[in-house]
Image (cartoon, helix red, strand yellow):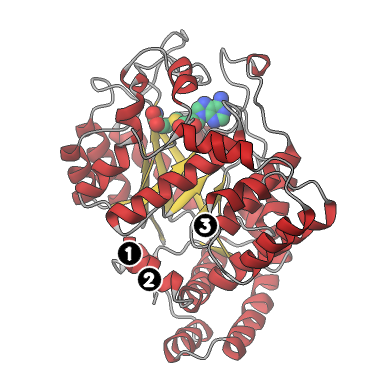
Amino acid sequence: MKFINEEKVKEILKTSVNPTHEEIDEIIDKAEHHENLDLLDVAKLLEVKDDDQLERIKTIAGKMKETIYGKRVVLFAPFYISNYCVNQCVYCGYNMKNKFKRKRLTQKQIAQEVKTLESLGHKRLALEAGEDPINCSMDYILESMDTIYDTRNQNGNIRRINVNIAATTVENYKRLKEKGIGTYILFQETYHEDTYKKMHPKGPKSNYEYHLTAFDRAMEAGIDDVGAGVLFGLYDYKFEVLSLIMHNLYLEEKYGVGFHTISVPRLKKAEGVSLDLFPNLVDDEAFIRIVTVLRLALPFVGIILSTRETPKMRERLIKHGVSQISAGSCTEVGGYKEKYESKQTINQFELSDERAPLEVISQLVDSGYIPSYCTACYRSGRTGDRFMRLAKSGQIGNVCEPNALMTLMEYVEDYGSEVLKEKAKTFIHTRVQAIKNEKVRDYTIKALERIENNERDLFI
Ligand code: SAM
């Protein structure tokens, strides 16, 4: 598929080697002044070695995220409903060659899991499944979405389901759209075609072009909210970063809107997967560079960090551009009830952050961030280009921060410990005052007043 032009990416990477100090300063200045970076600029930033320049990139990435989205950090949980899979992805524990007893949740089990997730405070899920048209058909996915949206636990309900399932047909994307999909998430894994073919030797996912064009079919079906990603560790990360940006540019040009989010999973140990076989693993230093440079290149795109990363790395990167994180995650099918009721942890690939949402939320508040379960954009139809228009005009922060504070207030009332209740009360009050001083829009002020009056389930 020629919108990923491998030759061009390689040429840019060659040209960008050893940029001068002045060149890098100029590119960082451009980013600081919110000017667009081209692919060569991005490639050069990926080459920076000077510590001061690296620090500047990190600082600007953090500021950029805060200028656009404010202090809020969106929270969600992945929800694995089936591990049946007909693919043989070399890096994945679900590889069909792995012999373990496969599971697919019944609708009753889904409702039980959702109740557990709701009892933790979750409002947003990312539904995950292996690919198997028979054991995990589109009918099953759609029925499961109904069950999830219909399951209520006291004050809890799931307000948005993002869906991360295999590339499919326009017809199926239309059905997902009708069911109320939030973001359709699909990781390209690697944009490098030869590597892609090696990593996906058999099964429907082995078709590089079909996988790469999934977002075209989703857009054609009316899903204007798509989330991309690369599995870092499969191929040269510089090639992947440029290709991600190329993919985004292509979608923007063709459909008027690019990625809503980008995920940056790093390869982890998994059932039957030894990391020794992967020569392109990304170390922490390179990983920070990837996230911060992506933020500079794509200021308006949400950047998602999962519990594959340690609490320390997550804390660092929230300061430098990450805008969404998963919390309290379990990657085992049906694992939430067991994890939170019997305290055992069984996961499909290794996790590095095992903290429950309460702990994550408490720590975010301590660091001055607003943990957000907000789903307002989705619920008010602010998706695709409507969302991006608001983001690009600098207005999104006016709705994000008050909405985030409202969901924090709800969370604290419904699920907060005494300690969190006490500290959140002061935190919310202080943030309300700060935003009132910074943001002068009428609707923002009105929303803040509703928070002060303890009104619930409201959003702007
Ligand atoms: N089956 C769906 C598909 O084909 O796109 C997606 C669901 S899969 C459970 C979610 C993602 O987990 C994959 O797209 C892949 O990037 C990631 N993943 C798989 N194995 C992994 C590993 N060993 N370490 C880290 N992430 C992994």
Q: Residue 318, located in which quarter of the rendered image? A: bottom right
Which of labels 3 and 1 is toward the front? 3
Q: Is mark 1 within 8 Å of ligand 1?
A: no
In the picture of the structure, the residue carrying the numbered disc 1 is 385
Q: Amino acid at mark 2?
A: Arg
Q: Considering only vertical position in the picture, is 240 above or below 137?
A: below
Residue 231 x, y percent position in the rendering: 53, 33
Q: Is mark 2 within 8 Å of ligand 1?
A: no
Of 217 and 363, which appears nearest the observer?
217
| Among numbered discs 3 and 2, the one appearing first in the sequence | 3
In the picture of the structure, the residue carrying the numbered disc 3 is 298
The alpha-carbon separation of the residues under discs 3 and 2 comes to 14 Å
Q: Residue 84, located in which quarter of the rendered image? A: top left
Label 2 neighbourhood size at 10 Å, few (<14), some (14-19), many (20+)? some
Of 104 and 341, which appears nearest the observer?
104
Instruction: Mark yes or no: residue 226 visible.
Output: yes
Quadrant holding the N terminus: top left
Q: Which mark is residue 389?
A: 2
Relative to 129, 132 lies left or right: left
Q: Amino acid at mark 3?
A: Leu
Label 1 neighbourhood size at 10 Å, few (<14), some (14-19), many (20+)? some
